[in-house]
Image (cartoon, coloured by chain):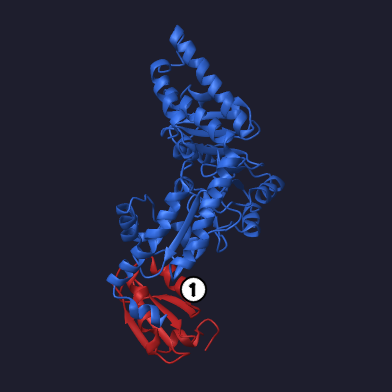
């Protein structure tokens, strides 16, 4: 969490815990803070305050956006409709689509190129199918960083009169929100806010029907007493991220660029994934042949570096990352580095210093010397 | 033989080498393939039997990285898993 957000959270816990729905003084003050938060988020995303709702997480915002759009277009005579999603969406989007599919909606999952960029032609073709009620495309990929062609696909959706849901969780606060969305979701902790804050935005012109039981909160879109202290802290974090956007982008892009460039020189049989140019500045993902991703994460953790992995062995489900699989990318020995805003150049140098030895040790222990000569 | 029955040669002929990696977790099936592909003559086919879900992506990905020809994957009749066929290119 950004320090400024942490301070705001602690201060808000003192001031802002009252129920904004109540008429007593504390309630009215909380209401005011909630309304102001909504206005500030709307300004950051380029929409109206009455289009913005706060959810309890980015995942919940995604679920509500997708299922609400589908529910609004469900027709007794014409059926539950058809939804298009890219193969590399965050699991929350794919899970929401699968949930709708269980209730009868048909779902088309469209492919990506080797960088994980959505295939614009295939997506457009799927969107033009009869009874398409929603298209889903992320602003950028959360695992490999590739920025998606939202403007082109938004144009195809506009022409086909299909609403476009953009999961902007990976890019909000780091890059301008792409134009052309009909529904949007974002997640407060991704830009340095506290956990427990999701944002759902629905344009006034887009039909949306609450998929959960009726509740008067959040314009009847998100049930339950909103977490106002967390919302206040998330808004402060978002504004701090936006104010710093260009400088942070330049710095982080340079640091991940160093990793991208040096890795193939330092480690043999190693592939860096994703578009090297049209990408988020803070993420770099790579896979090393002949080693186990979970072991690599553990060794890097011992050396003081916190990374994730898209390898099957590193996941609860024993399945490799669906993003890497959709790209046809090597999934074993995978490491995903996500650099926080305050990353120092020294720590990137130190990371590149320890990685080659760790990879050698792990390769040596599997007895794969013959593998290197045979491949 | 009707067009529907026609299969490519690599799918009907036996491979020059069959590697049993069933029950092995990634990266082991790939390591086994990389270690042993040199045992067959250039142009011949190696088969890898594997059931780790990651192999579905990793076998073709390894072929792409190492410039060997990925021929395809077929379900194994007797077990849950796949038979991947790779042609040694050099």
- Which of the image's four quarters has the C terminus of chain A? bottom left
- Which residue sits furthest front? A346
- Which residue sits furthest bottom? B41
Q: Is residue B39 above or below residue A294?
A: below
x and y percentages locating residue B73 in the rendered image: 43, 75
How crowded is the residue under tag 1: few (<14 C-alpha within 10 Å), some, or many (20+)?
some
**Which one is nearer the viewer's eye here, A264 or A230?**
A264
Q: In the rendered picture of this protein, how many numbered marks are placed on residues?
A: 1
Instruction: Look at the image and give the colour of chain A.
Output: blue
Residue B13 visible in this rendered orientation of the protein? yes
The chain drawn in red is: B
In this rendering, position of residue A174 left or right of residue A354: right
x and y percentages locating residue A231 in the rendered image: 47, 27
Residue A320 visible in this rendered orientation of the protein? no
Residue at image coords 53%, 59%:
A274
Q: Secondary structure at mark 1?
A: helix
- Which of the image's four quarters has the N terminus of chain A? top left
Residue to which mark 1 is pinned:
B65
Residue at image coords 39%, 87%:
B38
What chain does mark 1 sit on?
B
């Amino acid at each position: 969490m950004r320090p400024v957000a942490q301070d705001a959270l602690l201060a808000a816990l003192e001031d802002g815990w009252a129920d904004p729905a109540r008429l007593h003084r504390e309630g009215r003050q909380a209401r005011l803070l909630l309304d102001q938060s909504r206005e500030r988020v709307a300004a950051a995303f380029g929409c109206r305050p009455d289009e913005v709702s706060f959810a309890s997480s980015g995942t919940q915002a995604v679920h509500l956006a997708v299922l609400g759009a589908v529910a609004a277009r469900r027709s007794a005579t014409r059926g539950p409709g058809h939804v298009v999603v890219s193969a590399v969406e965050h699991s929350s989007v794919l899970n929401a689509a699968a949930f709708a599919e269980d209730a009868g909606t048909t779902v088309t999952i469209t492919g990506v190129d080797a960088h994980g960029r959505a295939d614009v032609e295939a997506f457009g073709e799927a969107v033009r199918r009869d009874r398409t009620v929603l298209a889903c495309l992320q602003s950028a990929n959360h695992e490999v960083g590739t920025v998606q062609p939202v403007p082109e696909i938004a144009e195809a959706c506009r022409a086909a009169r299909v609403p476009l849901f953009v999961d902007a969780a990976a890019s909000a606060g780091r890059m301008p929100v792409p134009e052309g969305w009909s529904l949007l979701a974002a997640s407060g902790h991704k830009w340095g806010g506290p956990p427990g804050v999701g944002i759902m935005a629905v344009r006034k012109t887009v039909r949306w029907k609450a998929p959960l039981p009726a509740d008067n909160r959040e314009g009847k879109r998100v049930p339950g007493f909103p977490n106002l202290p967390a919302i206040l802290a998330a808004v402060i974090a978002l504004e701090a991220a936006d104010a710093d956007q260009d400088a942070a982008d330049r710095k982080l892009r340079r640091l991940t660029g160093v990793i991208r460039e040096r890795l193939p020189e330092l480690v043999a049989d190693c592939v860096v994934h994703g578009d090297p140019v049209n990408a988020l500045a803070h993420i770099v993902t790579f896979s090393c042949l002949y080693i186990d991703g979970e072991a690599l994460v553990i060794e890097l953790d011992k050396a003081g570096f916190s990374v994730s992995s898209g390898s099957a062995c590193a996941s609860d489900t024993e399945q490799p990352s669906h993003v890497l699989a959709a790209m046809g990318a090597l999934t074993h020995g995978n490491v995903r580095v996500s650099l926080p805003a305050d990353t120092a150049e020294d720590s990137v140098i130190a990371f590149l210093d320890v990685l080659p030895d760790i990879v050698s040790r792990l390769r040596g222990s599997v007895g794969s010397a013959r593998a290197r000569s045979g491949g | 033989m009707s067009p529907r029955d026609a299969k490519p040669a690599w799918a009907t002929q036996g491979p020059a080498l069959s590697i049993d990696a069933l029950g092995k977790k990634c990266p082991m099936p790939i390591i086994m393939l990389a270690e042993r592909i040199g045992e067959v003559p250039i142009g011949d086919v190696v088969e890898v039997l594997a059931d780790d879900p990651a192999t579905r992506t990793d076998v073709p990905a390894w072929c792409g990285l190492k410039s060997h020809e990925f021929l395809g994957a077929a379900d194994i009749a007797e077990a849950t898993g796949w038979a991947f066929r790779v042609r040694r290119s050099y």
